[in-house]
C-alpha cells in the first residue's frame, strides 16, 4: 500500500466546513457488483489504495460502501457488509485525514463504521432504518439523507410522481425533521435528491437537477450523486464507461444551482469541473 500522504484537510467535528468551497466526495465501493466499478476495489487492499488515490486527486471526503444499490441489486447480509467496509474505513482513517462517510441502509453498519473512524453517515435509503438518526446523533456524526423511492430490487420498475421535485423535497424534509428530533444538528444534515433511485431519466433525474434550487432552498447543505448513472446513458446513448463528460456536465449544473457537494467516481476530473463552475457561480453579477 502507498505511504501515508500528508494532508492539510481534517476530520473536523464541525463538518461540513463553513465557506463556499464545493466538496468533491470520492466514491470507494468495496463491492463485487457496483454498477460502474464493481469488483475493481472489492479487496480491502484495493479499496484502500483507491481511497488514498482519490484523496491525492483532490477529494474532500471519502464515501465507503459495501452494498451496491444499483437497480435490481439484492440485499447483502449484514455480516458480509460489515466485513467489506470496516477494514476499509479503519485503514483510511489511519492513513488519511479526510472525513469518511459510511454509505449504508443499516444502523448497525453505520454504528460500527463510526466506531472505526467514519464521521458521516450516508443514509442511502434515507431513514427507513430510523435508528440511523439516533446513531448519527450519538456519535456527533453528520448525516446525508438520500431520497430513494422503493427498494433497489424494484425501484426502477414504474416510478411515478405528480411533481417529482415537490415530492422529493417533502420526503427529505420529513426525514430531516426526524433526524433533528433525534438530535442531529440541522446544519449537519445533508439532503440528496437520489439521482436514479426510483427515478426515470428525463422525467425525474433531469428535472431534479434542473430545479435543484428548490431543494437548496430548504436550507440544508445539498449533495448530488450523478456520476456515470443510467440517466446519462438515456440522454446520450453512452455506455457506463463513456459517461465521464456527461457526469461532469451534470456536476457543473448542480454547482451552479447551489449544491455543496458532488459524489463522484472520477475525482481529478470532477475537482477541476467543480472548481471552475464554483468560480463562475461566484462571479455572477447580482441582478440589477
Ligand atoms: N448513489 C449511489 C450510492 N450511494 N449515496 C448518495 N448520498 N447519493 C447517491 O447518488 C448515491 C449514493 C450509487 O452509486 P455507486 O455507489 O457508484 O453504485 P452502487 O450502488 O452500484 O455501488
Image (tube, rainbow, N blue to C red):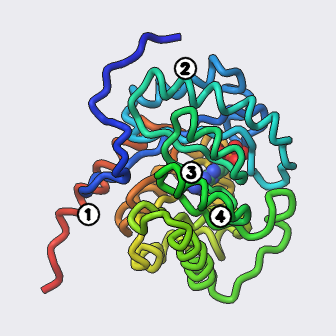
Label ID, residue 281: 1
Q: CA distance from mark 4 to mark 3?
A: 10 Å
Please say if the residues under marks 2 and 4 sit with CB atoms less than 8 Å apart: no
Give the mark nearest the N terminus, 1 or 4: 4
Q: CA distance from mark 2 to mark 3?
A: 22 Å
Label ID, residue 49: 2
Q: Which residue is mark 3?
A: 121
Q: Residue at 47% of width from left, 54% of height from top? A: 142
Q: CA distance from mark 1 to mark 2?
A: 34 Å
- The answer to whether 54 is drawn above or below residue 76 in the figure is above
Specify whether residue 239 is in view.
no
Give the mark nearest the N terminus, 4 or 3: 3
Give left or right: position of 264 versus 230.
left
Task: Determine the secondary structure under disc 3.
Answer: strand
Q: Residue at 51% of width from left, 59% of height from top? A: 224
Q: Residue at 38% of width from left, 49% of height from top? A: 23
How far across and how far down the image is residue 217, in percent? Answer: 40, 79
Q: Nearer the viewer, mark 2 or mark 3?
A: 3
How far across and how far down the image is residue 158, in percent? Answer: 83, 73
| CA neighbours of label 2 inside 10 A, class few (<14), some (14 to 19), many (20+) | many
Q: Which residue is mark 4?
A: 126
Q: Residue at 63% of width from left, 45% of height from top? A: 111
Q: CA distance from mark 2 to mark 4?
A: 29 Å
Q: Nearer the viewer, mark 1 or mark 3?
A: 3
Give the mark nearest the N terminus, 1 or 3: 3
Q: CA distance from mark 1 to mark 4?
A: 30 Å
- What is the residue that sits farthest to the bottom in this orientation? 162
Task: Confirm if mark 3 falls within 8 A of ligand 1.
Answer: no
| CA neighbours of label 4 inside 10 A, class few (<14), some (14 to 19), many (20+) | many
Amino acid at each position: 500500500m502507498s505511504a501515508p500522504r500528508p494532508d492539510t484537510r481534517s476530520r473536523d467535528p464541525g463538518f461540513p466546513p463553513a465557506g463556499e468551497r464545493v466538496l468533491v466526495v470520492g466514491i470507494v465501493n468495496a463491492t463485487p457488483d457496483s454498477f460502474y466499478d464493481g469488483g475493481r476495489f472489492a479487496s480491502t487492499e484495493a479499496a484502500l489504495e483507491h481511497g488514498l488515490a482519490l484523496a491525492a486527486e483532490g477529494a474532500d471526503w471519502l464515501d465507503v460502501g459495501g452494498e451496491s444499490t444499483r437497480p435490481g441489486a439484492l440485499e447483502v447480509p449484514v455480516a458480509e457488509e460489515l466485513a467489506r467496509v470496516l477494514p476499509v474505513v479503519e485503514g483510511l482513517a489511519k492513513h488519511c485525514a479526510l472525513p469518511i462517510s459510511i454509505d449504508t441502509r443499516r444502523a448497525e453498519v453505520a454504528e460500527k463504521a463510526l466506531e472505526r473512524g467514519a464521521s458521516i453517515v450516508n443514509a442511502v435509503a434515507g431513514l427507513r432504518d430510523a435508528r440511523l438518526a439516533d446513531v448519527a446523533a450519538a456519535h456527533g456524526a453528520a448525516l446525508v439523507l438520500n431520497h430513494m423511492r422503493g427498494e433497489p430490487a424494484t425501484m426502477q420498475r414504474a416510478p411515478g410522481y405528480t411533481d417529482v421535485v415537490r415530492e422529493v423535497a417533502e420526503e427529505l424534509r420529513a426525514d430531516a425533521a426526524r433526524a433533528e428530533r433525534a438530535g442531529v444538528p440541522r446544519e449537519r444534515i445533508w439532503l440528496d435528491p437520489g439521482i436514479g433511485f426510483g427515478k426515470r431519466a428525463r422525467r425525474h433525474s433531469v428535472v431534479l437537477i434542473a430545479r435543484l434550487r428548490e431543494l437548496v432552498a430548504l436550507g440544508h447543505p445539498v449533495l448530488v450523486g450523478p456520476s456515470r448513472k443510467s440517466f446519462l446513458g438515456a440522454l446520450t446513448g453512452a455506455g457506463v464507461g463513456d459517461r465521464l463528460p456527461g457526469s461532469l456536465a451534470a456536476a457543473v449544473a448542480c454547482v451552479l444551482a447551489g449544491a455543496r457537494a458532488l459524489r463522484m467516481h472520477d475525482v481529478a476530473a470532477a475537482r477541476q469541473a467543480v472548481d471552475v463552475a464554483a468560480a463562475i457561480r461566484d462571479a455572477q453579477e447580482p441582478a440589477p
